[in-house]
Image (cartoon, grey):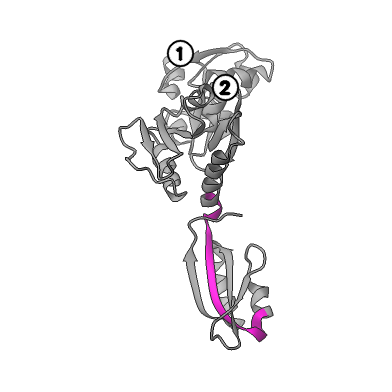
């Protein structure tokens, strides 16, 4: 089973980090290589341009892929299914025009020119509104094209909006919201190894922002402690060897609730409270 991942750029390091945290350690590194084995002999990694990954999966060069939703939409590949939103690399694809121009709505661009690195998404966006502006594909520096009279507006990726402001461009409308996703070819999505990979990555995402609490509680105060733990379902209660009248209580709570929860359970009678990080959480 081969997974295609970005070979460079802002998505590369977070993707490799996610694979490592999911237990898919890369055996022979991730720099300047086309392929890498993992600790699982049935899973290998293929490094490719983020924009090429959807095509690699559709054509069978890889079975699964990790790249931005915007790249999948732009590639317009068939028989590729999204398996999981990995919730990083978030950005927006927006329609923007010069601040001092008279373009204020999408309809104002009906007979204008729009420059973009995403021509397929852009044409679809305007077609849904019954419009057919001239779409010019560029390979970089999209935000400069209105100022050198190549286009009247652009469709481009933005994360913070800073680059748009620096180039005196204002957002007319959002075209697409994107984040990094895990996807697979339809003919392999039901295979057990694909599900293993999906579950491993999902377990890392589910553990983010969670902490594991362990404490000892007198049995007569157990209900009081249960009432103040905001965990995922009820806490786990276990007998303690030589614990006398105390039991062990374990619970998963949101990181933001830890400070208040420790105070509450201590006041409710808990002792020997331990908080640990969670690397993976399988629901």
Mark 2: few, some, or many residues within 10 Å (few <14, many ≥20)?
Answer: some
Viewer-closest of 127 and 213? 213
Q: CA distance from mark 2 to mark 1?
A: 29 Å
Which quadrant holds residue 225? bottom right
Q: Is residue 259 visible?
A: no
Residue 126 within the magenta-colored segment of the rendering: no
The residue furthest front is 41
Q: Which residue is mark 1?
A: 150
Residue at 51%, 31% (x, y): give it: 63
* Lateral position of residue 221 relative to residue 278, left or right: right
* Lateral position of residue 88 relative to residue 79, left or right: left
Residue 211 within the magenta-colored segment of the rendering: yes
- Quick one: SS at disc 2? loop
- Quick one: SS at disc 1? loop
Q: Which residue is mark 2?
A: 77
Viewer-closest of 36 and 17? 36
Quarter of the picture containing the C terminus is bottom right
Residue at 58%, 64% (x, y): give it: 253
Position of 81 relative to 141 (above/below): below
Q: Position of residue 270 (x, y in %)?
A: 57, 81
Mark 1: few, some, or many residues within 10 Å (few <14, many ≥20)?
Answer: some
Residue at 60%, 22% (x, y): give it: 78
Q: Position of residue 136 (x, y in %)?
A: 50, 13
Viewer-closest of 239 and 140? 239
Q: Position of residue 80 (x, y in %)?
A: 59, 28
Magenta residue span: 205-222
Viewer-closest of 72 and 59? 59
Position of 31 relative to 254 (above/below): above
Position of 33 relative to 122 (above/below): below
Q: Position of residue 172 (x, y in %)?
A: 58, 27
């Amino acid at each position: 089973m081969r997974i295609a991942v970005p070979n460079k750029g802002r998505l590369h390091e977070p993707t490799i980090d996610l694979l490592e945290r999911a237990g898919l350690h890369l055996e022979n590194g991730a720099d300047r290589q086309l392929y890498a084995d993992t600790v699982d002999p049935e899973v290998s990694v293929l490094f490719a341009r983020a924009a090429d990954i959807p095509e690699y999966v559709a054509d069978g060069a890889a079975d699964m892929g990790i790249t931005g939703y915007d790249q999948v939409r732009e590639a317009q590949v068939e028989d590729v299914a999204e398996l999981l939103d990995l919730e990083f690399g978030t950005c927006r694809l927006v329609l923007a025009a010069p601040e001092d121009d008279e373009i204020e709505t999408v309809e104002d661009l009906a007979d204008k020119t729009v420059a973009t690195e995403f021509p397929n998404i852009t044409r679809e966006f305007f077609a849904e509104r019954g419009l057919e502006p001239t779409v010019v594909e560029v390979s970089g520096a999209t935000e400069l094209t209105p100022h050198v009279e190549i286009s009247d507006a652009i469709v481009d990726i933005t994360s913070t909006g800073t680059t748009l402001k620096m180039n005196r461009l204002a957002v007319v409308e959002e075209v697409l919201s994107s984040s990094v996703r895990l996807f697979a070819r339809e003919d392999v999505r039901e295979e057990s190894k694909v599900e293993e990979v999906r579950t491993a990555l999902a377990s890392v995402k589910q553990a983010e922002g969670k902490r594991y609490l362990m404490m000892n509680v007198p049995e007569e105060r157990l209900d009081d402690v249960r009432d103040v733990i905001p965990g995922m379902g009820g806490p786990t209660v276990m007998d303690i060897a030589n614990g006398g009248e105390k039991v062990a209580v374990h619970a998963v709570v949101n990181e933001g609730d830890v400070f208040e929860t420790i105070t509450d359970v201590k006041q409710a009678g808990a002792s020997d409270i331990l908080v640990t990080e969670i690397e993976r959480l399988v629901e």
